[in-house]
Image (cartoon, rainbow, N blue to C red):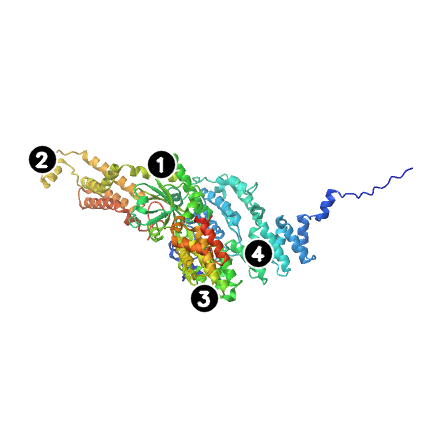
Amino acid sequence: MVELTEDSFREHVEQLASDPSQLLDLLRENHPLYDQRGAATVVRMRGWVMLTLARTTLTDDALPFVIEDLDTGVDAYLVAAAAAALRSYPTPGSAFAPFVVRAITNIRYRDERLSLETYGGFAIGTKGTSPVRELLTTLRWLGPHARVVVSEIESLQTGPTALSKKYHADIEQILKTIRAETGVEADDCCRLPDSVRDLFSWMRIPGTNSSSITSTIFEDQDGHTITFGDYFHRRPSIVVFFYTRCDNPLKCSLTITKLARIQKLLDSEGLSDQINTAGITYDPGFDLPERLQNYGRHRGIHFAPQHRLLRSQDGLDKLRKHFQLGVNFIESLVNRHRIELYLLDAKGQTAGYFGRIQWNEQDVVDRVKEILKENETPANNSASSRFRVASPFLGTAVALGLALFPKCPFCWAAYLSLFGIAGLESIPYSPWLQPVLAIMLLLNLTSVWFRSRATSRMIPFYLVTAGALTIIAAKAFAGPTAAGFIGVFLTLAGSVWSTLSTSSLNRRPMKEGMKKVPIDLIQE
Amino acid sequence: MTTKKRSTKKRQPTKKAAAAKKSPAKRSPKAAFAVATNEKKTSAERAKAFVEAPLATIQSDETAQASLNVLRDREQPIKVRLAALQSLQAASFSVIEFEPYREDYLATLREIVDDKDEELRQRVLGILAREKDGYVQKRLLEGLQDSSKALVPPEKALQLLSYDVHAEAYPVAREIVNDPPSPEAKREALRLLSADANSAPVFEKLLRDKEEDRDVRQISAVALQTVKPKRFQEQARELVLDEKEYDDIQATALTGLAQFGDEKAVAKDQKLMKRAEELGKAKSAKVKKTAKRFLTRYGTEK
């Protein structure tokens, strides 16, 4: 039973108003506060969180949630809240314009009067706003940045897709602003802030171990059973989540329709037998085989041993935990979920993710092909994993060599004698070794940088950089001193950290890093 | 001079005149609307005019507002208000033409959810409930939790809430099943719960309980078939084999098996087939009919 009333929730949000990070956490679909709430209640709660966030400046971290509701939202209150919230973002940008126009298309036939002043947003009588009104206000806020969608805006004024006359004055104003401001500095057209751009470019996730769900039993649309391990191991997979009772046509129904298109693309590239596709239902209690069969068939899904719609016979809990699914429930019914597509490698480990916003089918296919390539050559795979294990030590050895590199032949002889090999006159002092070692140190630095960027964990890179700089400074000013050893230690620490097991890394919220990503992506 | 004899043959009326005689001239939507909003006309005339041409209510902003004003105005005759509602509701099916007025329409409906006229109230709530309107869901739930705030009887509230499977009605529906204010409320609560797969044990228990109201058992059978078809098949089999079971319950069980049964499993089930043959000769016409249908499906009867 729900313990926190909506009034208490509203007060709770007010108390958090000065702490955007805690507020942002409330936008996670799987937040416990949404458990056992009806869908309409969740809409009110989320809308109020979004409006409270927007009282100050909307941050990049909050943007994905706002953009999501503009992209696929069909709830009037949430779309209106998202439109209003976007206006609190520090700088308008042309990249937002297509989303605002798309939101108008999505919501125009569900327009209704509401209030953004109070929690719940119900408007009775003549006072209030509406999602279309808020979206037009946001277009006005975008001003000349909305130039990229000027033809769509014009079609809202005249022609068969025109909005009702009551909005024409607003639209005229928007068009005037667009046409008048020719001197506005063009922003990097359609370049979204990183946090949202990453939702389009896929999220490469270091493989999460799937051992907790390997034995999960699924039943497919034909009533055949199969375990996670049997289905998802040996081949890369594209996995979407959905349920047949979803009442947002822009989410589950479209997701399965697009999955069918992905199947066609795979088929046209001769990859149908090399890549699995799967739709897993959030609602295994209701989505029995016959329902899965009908739902998929009506959306063009081609069923085959490697292409199935699945329901978990063991319930959804383990899958929820493993994938950190963005979903919540009232009883067995979904009350809210995000769009989520996962790419799994041949070991069933999560290798990529597209979420929240509509993904492009060709993009998904291109990404899964990369994963297929990586998995294709076992020799390369074991070579690459050997390299990953060896590289921290190689990097450290290089750092050590550079730190201790002697300045002169006498020092070289002294080192050799220290290591008991003084009699080996045949090993000459080779001054060219020093720059070679420096180059190898730089190579190590670069490889750590790539790995850090892929995992969005930059601390290893910073450590290795600090180590390299320390060694160079020690060499430049003081010779092989303690500073050089500190530099070697930092290099070792950073190199080892960058190759640590990714499963332990993934359990922490991805708050740091070069790219700002949705914080709910991988969490406890 | 000869006078032409006037023809005694009766003049045949023209086709046009004949048609006009059959049905009086249909007035234009504009004319109908003028009558509908004319307070000097009788309620019956106005109501009839409203219903004649639904799209007349949205032929302009003025007509739409006038229609909504009539609907909103609690002083207007209820017959006229109901007709205005019917007209607007019909017009709302023309989604594109209705787009400009939807906002005002829904706001007006919310304004009158607590109207004193029960029929108007129920119809307004029905329209908003089908829109999955959060405001109405909240009001209906409040009414179920506190009868002093109820807008409609509990069974009606549950029925309206069931239009949205994502509504927050499951906990209160369970409470009503356990402690029903009325038999109708219990039945509606069960129907609502049939959307929730977790409720299967409730349905199973009620289905097997011979002391339970037969309507409740029927509803439980249908609900169990929806959420747990295999379990329903097992239960249905037991019900058919039970010689002490009521006829109507056995008929429901046979129907379920006939329509949804696993053909191979049922055809092999000698005990069940034999029992169905016995029921094919039963006194109850309903049981006999459903048994024959069952036997036709599984091949022993042509």
- Gap between marks 3 and 1, in whole Å? 58 Å
Percent position (x, y) of residue B188?
A: 49, 60
The residue carrying pointer 4 sits among few (fewer than 14), some (14 to 19) or many (20 or more) residues within 10 Å by Cα, namely: many
Percent position (x, y) of residue A9?
A: 42, 60
- Gap between marks 4 and 3, in whole Å? 36 Å
Between marks 4 and 2 in the image, the one whose residue lies nearer the viewer: 4
Amino acid type, label 2:
Leu
Q: Is residue A292 above or below residue A435?
A: below
- Gap between marks 4 and 2, in whole Å? 99 Å
Q: Quadrant of residue B235?
A: bottom left
Image mark 2: chain? A
Residue A208, visible in the rendered structure: yes
Q: Which residue is mark 3?
A: B179
The residue carrying pointer 3 sits among few (fewer than 14), some (14 to 19) or many (20 or more) residues within 10 Å by Cα, namely: few
Q: Which residue is mark 1?
A: A271
Q: Which residue is mark 2?
A: A424
Q: Are marks 4 and 2 in contact (CB under 8 Å)?
A: no
Image mark 1: chain? A
Q: Quadrant of residue B202?
A: bottom left
Percent position (x, y) of residue A179?
A: 53, 40
Q: Quadrant of residue A485?
A: top left
